[in-house]
Image: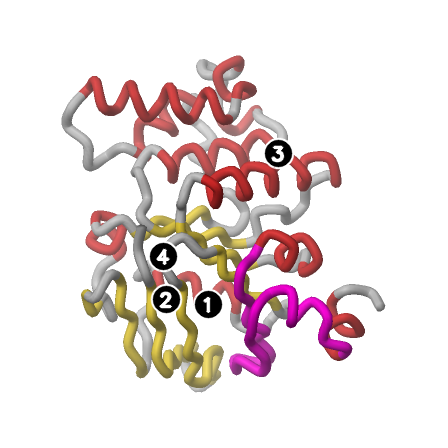
Amino acid sequence: MSSLLVENLAVSYGRTEALKGITLRVEPGQIVCLIGANGAGKTTAMRALSGLLRPRAGRITFDGTDITGLRPHRIAGLGLLQVPEGRQVFAELTVAENLALGAWLVTDPSEIARRRAGVLERFPRLAERAQQYAGSLSGGEQQMLAFGRALMGAPKLLLLDEPSMGLAPILVDEIFTAIAALKAEGTTILLVEQNASAALEVADHAYVLETGRIVLSGPAATVANDRSIITAYLGG
């Protein structure tokens, strides 16, 4: 199990400050959620953590190693893997080929087979569609595939960016059941999610992001009972 420490992280798009010095921590075995409205900076934070954006300032430490500014493939190689917003599966490759790409660092065929078997056991629908093109899958199936592809890399810490976006309620339940199962197995997770109610229910700790700043943090149950959060995000 692995830990993540983000200190005073600032990211800009030209002259626009998207993140204005955020600090957060993910302890081993925890699910930490980052909630906020559209445009708050949630996806920017995830892209910076996975190396897709270079921070203007601040530091990112993963398992005691400073990974600030490292290239994405090096960060992934350390075990910090992301399930991106919008799934971003390879539409013209099959389900099986997408999964194989998730194990790009693994050279032992038997280990690749073991991981694939674990993914298909977790998401039986992918086994049924193994030879279908990923672009032909439903949105929920593509989300399962994006999950599975990341799990093929045996993540030490999983970044989940809006996993329920655009899914029907029954599929949202299925995705959060999978997240809860990963937590029970000891997987450390940072979850960005607009569905604040579902995120707070599964998380241990929560941070609330508004216009690039952390405005509230604490145990998820405490944040879920905060009157301002209920009004802004939980429909109260």
Mark 3, residues whose alpha carbon is within 10 Å: few (<14), some, or many (≥20)?
many
Residue 79 in picture, x, y percent from top left: 27, 48
Q: CA distance from mark 4 to mark 3?
A: 28 Å
Q: CA distance from mark 2 to mark 3?
A: 26 Å
> What is the magenta range?
203-227
Marks 3 and 1 close (CB-CB < 8 Å): no
Identity, as a three-letter code, of the amino acid under mark 2: Ala
Where does label 2 land, which residue?
48
Q: Residue at x 31, y 48 (%)?
A: 156
Q: Earlier in the sequence, mark 3 or mark 1?
A: 1
Residue 94 in picture, x, y percent from top left: 42, 21
On whether residue 207 falls in the magenta region, the answer is yes
SS class of the residue under badge 4? loop
Question: Which one is in front in this view, the residue at disc 2 or the one at disc 4?
Answer: 4
SS class of the residue under badge 1? helix
Where does label 1 land, which residue?
44
Q: Quadrant of the C terminus?
A: bottom right
Where does label 4 land, which residue?
28
Q: Residue at x 21, y 18 (%)?
A: 110
Residue 2 in picture, x, y percent from top left: 30, 55
Where does label 3 land, which residue?
140
Identity, as a three-letter code, of the amino acid under mark 3: Gly
Q: CA distance from mark 3 to mark 1?
A: 24 Å
